[in-house]
Image (spheres, coloured by chain):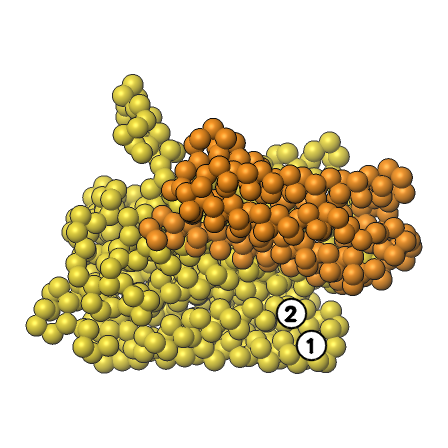
Chain colours: A yellow, B orange
């Protein structure tokens, strides 16, 4: 593609920029996804920082109430749609073709479309700060919460255009995600290298196949609900208009039919990262490959029928409550299987405690805690007590921060050498890790307790006599530590890009195909592939006397 | 089967799954709101069975299948003719929908904002009609290529993918017809 474009007149930064803008290469698009996601992570993190400052002491007036509403709305939307999804699918962009020995994704141009429409959607959300005021003077930036419950988000209750920016932004990023999911499925289904049977695919590829299939089933319903909301707001339809007989609850069903499986769409690829990293740093094969794959697929299947556990407090009745409580607890079973897979891999291994493994170990502890509070909240009467409290906020931050983000950092340290040809600094990596672990747990372990004491989420301040003061102060004190950790990570990336130790093809002595090519890989990925006769083709190359094949 | 073709097939299957999921929510919303309109008009007052349009659309699935079969056998002219008939049948279906909407909107004053029935009826039928239009654009391109001589037997697999989409649009109509004109009336 590049040869066909006349770049002779341009040079230096313009040529590089041109190269990245017109690219359809899965590796470049993958890097662009991940970098954009990290930029939005910093923005979303700053929004959280502001909210925590406001809540540090009772009765502060640092952030006015309507601004506070906008902050938590945009923070949530950013973290799910502009951080979680692009980073997860960006890694898949980069890794899936390399791991299965393919030249690129099945539809490279569709892939580029997915990235640019995502970027447009992200810009649209943040443009609302400037343009959301519209002609109405009704306030900029959406303030309806990241799940925009209708009828609250209807024109009558939320005038102006801010909510429409939220709506269109999430709608178009959704189109990009659906396109990428189709692309990944087609790639995995039809472009595996000779010998790369389904049973030999890396666990990470299995996780991406599962979540791509889930994406096709859950994202279009969200798009549909958003189209309905647009019709209500602009054409005077009555989907969520209770005065015309519309339902006040059906939006919640539509949204959470997307919203809950979405948690797994984000989390399961994190399981994939861990399943690639732990074996390499334990110097063992993954323990129970088949059960791990089966657990992945069953999480995907069961997760489709758990959505209404977000709605125990709307009064669905005993039958539905019991069904959704049971299905939610059921997801804990395959998830528990995975924890044992990882522990079984670590057990008896020659552990190398490099930064990626450190992040994986913290993930194991924190994700276990997240799972346990999840089981607590799946008990409907318990949820009646704690729904919409800070206990819930702490729970899902344990999932998405303590779980997903830690695995993302593990993956960044693990695959950065492949993508750039240079190692990240271990010394800075350790500082990053320990500051983040301490800061995260200080903030989010503590956050459970004001929730248990009855502090509701989404309040911009609170009175001094509720016993929440010290707990909120401690929660806020963890934030600077986390910010410093992320700053150290950025320094590490910038420093290592220039001065990092050269990585070589396979710095971790790993076994999957992406390590068989150079770092960074050439545009065509592989000059020649090693023979694939087991799940660890590079192990077989290194140990031709005792290949894996007969043992699998 | 070469790998480009199998890639395309996997992609179109994925697309159709996502589209099914999109339609499912509009169908669920329609079913959920049947009989919940506090005011009229109600479906039984204004809807008539679109028999002729339905016959046209369903038979167009047959003609598009004939077209892909003819093209695979190398009979380009015959394929082009079948594709042309498919387009005509599709346009006839759209015309019947347009006539229905004109009657409802211009003569009865029944719009998306009238009541819950209007709210759920127009988006569901309209979403389907917009998919018919998209399919007609693709089929018309195939007809143009057949006339200009650009369409060859090697393109049989691509035309087949268009036909898959068209069959899907027809299948959705069977559901919409059942839900809106049979169950909902």
Q: In which quadrant of the rendered image does the N terminus of chain A lie? A: top left
Dot placed on the residue nearer the N-terminal end, 2 or 1: 2
Q: In percent of the image, x 27 and y 30: which residue is there? A: A3
Chain name for mark 1:
A
Residue B105 image offset from top left, x and y in percent: 84, 40
Query: Which quarter of the figure has residue A325?
Result: bottom right
Q: Residue at x 22, y 69 (%)?
A: A534
Point out residue A528 in the picture as x, y percentages from the top left corner.
17, 51
Q: Position of residue B93 (x, y in %)?
A: 70, 44
Which residue is rendered at x = 19% and y = 73% of the image? A549
Q: Please say whether residue A389 is visible from this viewpoint.
A: yes
Under circle 1, the secondary element is helix
Circle 2 sits in a helix, a strand or a loop, which is it?
helix
Q: Nearer the viewer, residue A542 or A142?
A: A542
Quadrant position of residue A327: bottom right
Per the image, the residue denoted by label 2 is A308
Q: Which mark is residue A320?
A: 1
| Foreground residue among A423 and B107 | B107
């Amino acid at each position: 593609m590049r040869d066909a474009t006349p770049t002779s007149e341009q040079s230096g930064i313009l040529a590089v920029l041109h190269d990245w803008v017109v690219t359809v290469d899965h590796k470049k698009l993958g890097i662009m996804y991940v970098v954009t996601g990290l930029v939005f992570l910093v923005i979303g993190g700053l929004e959280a920082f502001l909210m925590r400052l406001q809540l540090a002491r009772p009765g502060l007036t640092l952030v006015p109430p309507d601004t506070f509403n906008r902050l938590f709305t945009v923070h949530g939307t950013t973290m799910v749609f502009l951080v979680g999804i692009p980073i997860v699918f960006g890694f898949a962009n980069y890794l899936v073709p390399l791991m299965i020995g393919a030249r690129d994704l099945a539809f490279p141009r569709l892939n580029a479309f997915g990235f640019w429409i995502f970027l447009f959607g992200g810009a649209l959300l943040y443009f609302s700060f400037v343009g959301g005021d519209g002609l109405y003077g009704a306030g900029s930036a959406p303030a309806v919460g990241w799940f925009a419950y209708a009828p609250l988000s209807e024109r009558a209750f939320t005038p102006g255009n801010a909510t429409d920016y939220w709506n269109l932004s999430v709608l178009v990023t959704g189109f990009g995600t659906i396109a990428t999911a189709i692309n990944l499925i087609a790639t995995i289904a039809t472009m595996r290298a000779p010998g790369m049977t389904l049973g030999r695919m890396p666990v990470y590829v299995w996780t991406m196949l599962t979540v791509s299939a889930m994406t096709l089933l859950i994202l279009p319903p969200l798009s549909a609900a958003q189209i309905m909301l647009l019709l209500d707001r602009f054409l005077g339809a009555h989907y969520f208009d209770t005065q015309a007989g519309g339902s006040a609850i059906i939006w919640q069903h539509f949204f959470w039919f997307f919203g809950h499986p979405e948690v797994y769409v984000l989390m399961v690829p994190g399981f994939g990262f861990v399943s690639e990293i732990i074996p390499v740093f334990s110097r063992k094969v993954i323990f129970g490959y088949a059960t791990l794959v089966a657990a992945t697929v069953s999480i995907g299947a069961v997760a489709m029928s758990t959505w209404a556990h977000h709605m125990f407090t709307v009064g669905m009745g005993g039958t539905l409550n019991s069904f959704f409580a049971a299905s939610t607890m059921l997801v804990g079973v395959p998830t528990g299987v995975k924890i044992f897979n990882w522990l079984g891999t670590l057990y008896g291994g020659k552990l190398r405690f490099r930064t990626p493994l450190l992040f994986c170990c913290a993930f194991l502890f924190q994700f276990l805690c997240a799972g346990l509070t999840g089981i607590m909240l799946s008990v409907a009467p318990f949820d009646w007590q704690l729904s919409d409290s800070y206990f819930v906020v702490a729970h899902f931050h344990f999932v998405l921060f303590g779980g997903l983000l830690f695995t993302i950092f593990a993956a960044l340290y693990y695959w950065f050498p492949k993508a750039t040809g240079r190692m990240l600094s271990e010394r800075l990596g350790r500082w990053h890790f320990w500051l983040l672990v301490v800061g995260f747990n200080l903030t989010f372990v503590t956050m459970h307790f004001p929730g248990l004491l009855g502090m509701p989420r989404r309040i911009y301040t609170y009175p001094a006599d509720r016993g929440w003061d010290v707990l909120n102060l401690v929660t806020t004190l963890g934030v600077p530590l986390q910010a410093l950790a992320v700053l150290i990570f950025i320094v590490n990336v910038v420093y290592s890009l220039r001065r990092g130790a050269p990585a070589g093809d396979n710095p971790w002595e790993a076994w999957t195909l992406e390590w068989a090519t150079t770092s960074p890989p050439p545009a065509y990925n592989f000059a020649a592939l090693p023979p694939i006769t087991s799940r660890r083709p590079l192990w077989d190359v290194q140990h031709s006397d005792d290949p894996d094949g007969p043992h699998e | 089967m070469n790998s480009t073709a199998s890639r395309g097939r996997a992609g179109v299957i994925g697309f159709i799954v996502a589209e099914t999921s999109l339609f499912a929510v509009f169908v669920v919303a329609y079913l959920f709101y049947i009989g919940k309109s506090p005011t009229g008009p109600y479906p039984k007052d204004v809807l008539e069975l679109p028999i002729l349009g339905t016959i046209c659309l369903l038979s167009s699935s047959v003609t598009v299948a004939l077209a892909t079969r003819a093209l695979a056998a190398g009979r380009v002219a015959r394929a082009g003719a079948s594709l042309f008939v498919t387009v005509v049948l599709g346009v006839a279906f759209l015309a019947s929908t347009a006539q229905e909407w004109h009657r409802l909107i211009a003569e009865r004053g029944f719009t998306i904002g009238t009541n819950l029935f209007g709210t759920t009826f127009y988006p569901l039928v309209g979403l389907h009609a917009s998919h018919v239009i998209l399919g007609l654009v693709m089929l018309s391109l195939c007809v143009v290529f057949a006339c200009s001589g650009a369409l060859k037997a090697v393109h049989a697999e691509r035309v087949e993918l268009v036909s898959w989409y068209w069959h899907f649009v027809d299948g959705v109509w069977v559901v919409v017809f059942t839900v809106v004109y049979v169950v909902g009336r």
